[in-house]
């Protein structure tokens, strides 16, 4: 029996010798590599946290003592040691746990967390509640992987430092974010590493923390010793640990950015020096477009909040762009305000962000950008209904952004439309513009798009018909086209097909014209229905004789739900939509 097979809870760890724990660490790494290369997931961050996690559970009395993970990128070893080992060792059970902490899975997990820079604030709350109730358990926040560049981390640190009771913050310093780190704090972390934590200039001490440094975050004896020394202390404490992202997997250590998160089979392909050739997609289209703009116009600045790879900004692009590229760290709020400031001073900012992460920027979008009408361009990637976990859903950006005054939110349906929108947005000076970058395969019309997008809220009628009008927004325009054809084939209904383009306004002239020979208007949107595009259309027709059917997603957090199931339960299968339309028409509304 392996050491790992003996560990069913942290209590079993405490029975092991240091030698056994070191064997356990290697067994855990092997299991992690096999599992993640099979299913995909976060590889590098978890490999770097194996010994730290073993030492934490060895020293602290979890779940009475509380461990709160930041982002959850580093929680796989924690799950292995807290009763979920088989989800990492038995291929038949690989899908039984999520990639993020989840209280529904285990009492050892305190929060569902998948966004960054939150652990210290959450831990502050847990510690405050403990103090009010006279508790004595340890509260440990784990933050790293670049999360210290997020604004909430600073707010949490500022308040944790004056808590006046037990609060332990483990700073996992692996010298990386998702890509390379950016920001002034990392200069101080480097200085602390170079001086083994002895530098007089110490950010953490300066704001009131006790401070401990561990040079080798993979040395179990050192980790256990320091954790034992800070356990039960009644003062906010930082334990700064230097680890290696991707530890134990040579290709992950060599290419830390690529192996932050991987798809299945990535390890094998990297070890055999195979790199899958990437066909054209909307990220490569974006990158090619921006490369040209950076060369042509010195005012262009491409901005990433620490997710360059996810939006197609390769290392080569970043190198070529030079001063025309800025990585602001995991700081989306700053990125929006930064973009607004650049635009106000005559620059041409293009911020690139994932749908799930733009949720953190509502105040900046509203106040810093929209209220001031500064002409920044924001590109939202990965928007739409998907089988993602509950913390990374891209279905909420339409209701969020489309209801902020002054913003123009566009939904291109083809490559040509997308490029035309990019050109218009970067050349106009009247509006902050957000473009929802299409997902899925590239659709090309084959001819340049000459639309003047400055004439706001003008929908495109693609095919004229009667009785039924179908408005297919962005990603769902091709679904609308399929429904349009199927209505004709199955029921001889020749509908009007419309590409709405704008999510922030309605083409009232066109919608009024439809009243003359249309009984039913159908909207399709790849996102949450509540507060979305379809509701705007339904509200417009509310007092008329025109019936409106809205199709999209429910207001809910789904978690790794297969897209086929997700689409079926939301009636987004073409056959379902066509039957729903025909049913309404037969009822004679």
Image (cartoon, rainbow, N blue to C red):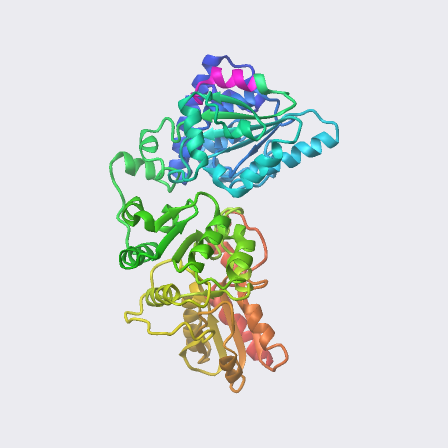
Can residue 149 be seen from the camera position used here? Answer: yes
Q: Which of 376 and 241 is in front in this view?
A: 376
Please, is residue 394 above or below residue 330 in the view? below
Q: Is residue 548 above or below residue 122?
A: below
Residue 57: % across, % down: 55, 23
Left or right of 346: which side holds 554?
A: right
Q: In this view, does 344 lie to the left or right of 272?
A: right
Task: Identify the residue at horizontal 44%, vertical 30% (top origin).
Answer: 189
Query: Could you say where residue 20 lies in the image, as x and y percent from the top left?
Result: 47, 15
Q: Of 94 and 496, which appears nearest the observer?
A: 496
* Name of the residue lying farthest toward the left: 273
Look at the image and give the residue range highlighted in magenta.
215-228
Task: Please count the marks in the image.
Answer: 0
What is the x, y in percent for residue 504? 51, 68
Picture coordinates of residue 246, whole percent (x, y): 38, 31
Q: Is residue 15 above or below residue 129?
A: above
Q: Does the magenta stretch include residue 117?
A: no
Q: Answer with left or right where residue 548 lies relative to residue 50.
A: right
Task: Relative to 282, say whether 8 is above or below.
Answer: above
Who's the residue at 39% across and 32% down the image?
Answer: 34
* Main SS, magenta residues: helix
Res. 105 visible in picture: no
In the image: residue 62, left or right of residue 95: right
| Residue visible at 55% across and 42% down in the picture | 152
The reply to whether the magenta stretch includes residue 216 is yes
Quadrant of residue 194 in the image? Answer: top left
Quarter that holds the C terminus: bottom right
């Amino acid at each position: 029996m392996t050491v790992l097979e003996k560990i069913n809870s942290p209590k079993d760890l405490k029975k092991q010798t240091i030698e056994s724990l070191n064997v356990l660490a290697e067994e855990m790494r092997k299991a992690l590599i096999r599992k993640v290369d099979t299913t995909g997931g976060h590889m590098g961050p978890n490999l770097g946290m194996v010994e730290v996690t073993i030492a934490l559970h060895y020293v602290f009395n979890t779940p009475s003592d509380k461990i709160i993970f930041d982002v959850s990128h580093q929680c796989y070893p924690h799950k292995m040691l807290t009763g979920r080992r088989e989800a990492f060792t038995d291929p038949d059970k690989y899908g039984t746990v999520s990639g993020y902490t989840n209280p529904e899975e285990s009492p050892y997990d305190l929060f569902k967390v998948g966004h960054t820079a939150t652990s210290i604030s959450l831990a502050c709350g847990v510690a405050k509640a403990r103090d009010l109730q006279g508790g004595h358990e340890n509260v440990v926040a784990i933050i790293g992987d670049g999360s210290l560049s997020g604004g909430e981390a600073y707010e949490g640190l500022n308040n944790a430092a004056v808590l006046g009771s037990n609060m332990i913050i483990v700073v996992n310093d692996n010298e990386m974010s998702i890509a390379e780190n950016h920001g002034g704090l990392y200069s101080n972390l480097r200085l602390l590493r170079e001086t083994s934590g002895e530098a007089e200039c110490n950010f953490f001490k300066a704001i009131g923390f006790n401070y401990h440094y561990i040079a080798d975050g993979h040395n179990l004896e050192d980790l256990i010793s320091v954790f034992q020394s800070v356990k039960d202390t009644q003062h906010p404490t930082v334990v700064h640990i230097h680890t290696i992202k991707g530890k134990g997997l040579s290709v992950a250590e060599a290419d830390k950015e690529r192996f932050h998160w991987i798809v299945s089979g990535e390890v094998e392909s990297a070890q055999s020096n195979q790199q899958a050739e990437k066909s054209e997609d909307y990220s490569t289209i974006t990158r090619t477009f921006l490369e040209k703009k950076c060369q042509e116009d010195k005012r262009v600045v491409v901005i990433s909040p620490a997710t360059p790879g996810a939006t197609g900004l390769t290392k080569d692009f970043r190198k070529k762009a030079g001063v025309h590229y800025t990585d602001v760290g995991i700081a989306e709020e700053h990125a929006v305000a930064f973009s607004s400031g650049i635009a106000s001073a005559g620059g041409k900012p293009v911020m690139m962000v994932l749908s799930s992460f733009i949720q953190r920027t509502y105040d900046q979008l509203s106040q810093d950008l929209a209220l001031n009408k500064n002409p920044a361009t924001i590109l939202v990637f990965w928007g739409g209904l998907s089988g993602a976990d509950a913390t990374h859903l891209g279905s909420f950006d339409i209701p969020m952004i489309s209801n902020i005054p002054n913003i123009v939110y566009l939904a291109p349906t083809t490559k040509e439309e997308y490029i035309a929108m990019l050109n218009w947005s970067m050349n106009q000076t009247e509006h902050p513009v957000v473009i929802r970058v299409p997902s899925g395969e590239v659709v090309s019309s084959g001819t340049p798009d000459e639309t003047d997008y400055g004439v706001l809220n003008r929908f495109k009628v693609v095919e004229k018909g009667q009785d039924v009008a179908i408005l297919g927004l962005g990603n769902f325009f091709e679904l609308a086209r399929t429904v349009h054809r199927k209505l004709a084939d199955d029921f001889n209904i020749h509908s009007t097909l419309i590409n709405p383009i704008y999510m922030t306004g309605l083409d009232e002239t066109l919608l009024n014209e439809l009243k003359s020979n249309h009984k039913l208007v159908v909207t399709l949107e790849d996102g949450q229905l509540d507060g979305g595009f379809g509701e705007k259309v339904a509200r417009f027709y509310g007092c008329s004789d025109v019936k409106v059917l809205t199709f999209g997603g429910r207001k809910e957090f789904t978690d790794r739900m297969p897209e086929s199931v997700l689409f079926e339960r939301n009636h987004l299968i073409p056959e379902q939509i066509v039957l729903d339309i025909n049913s309404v028409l037969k009822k004679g509304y």
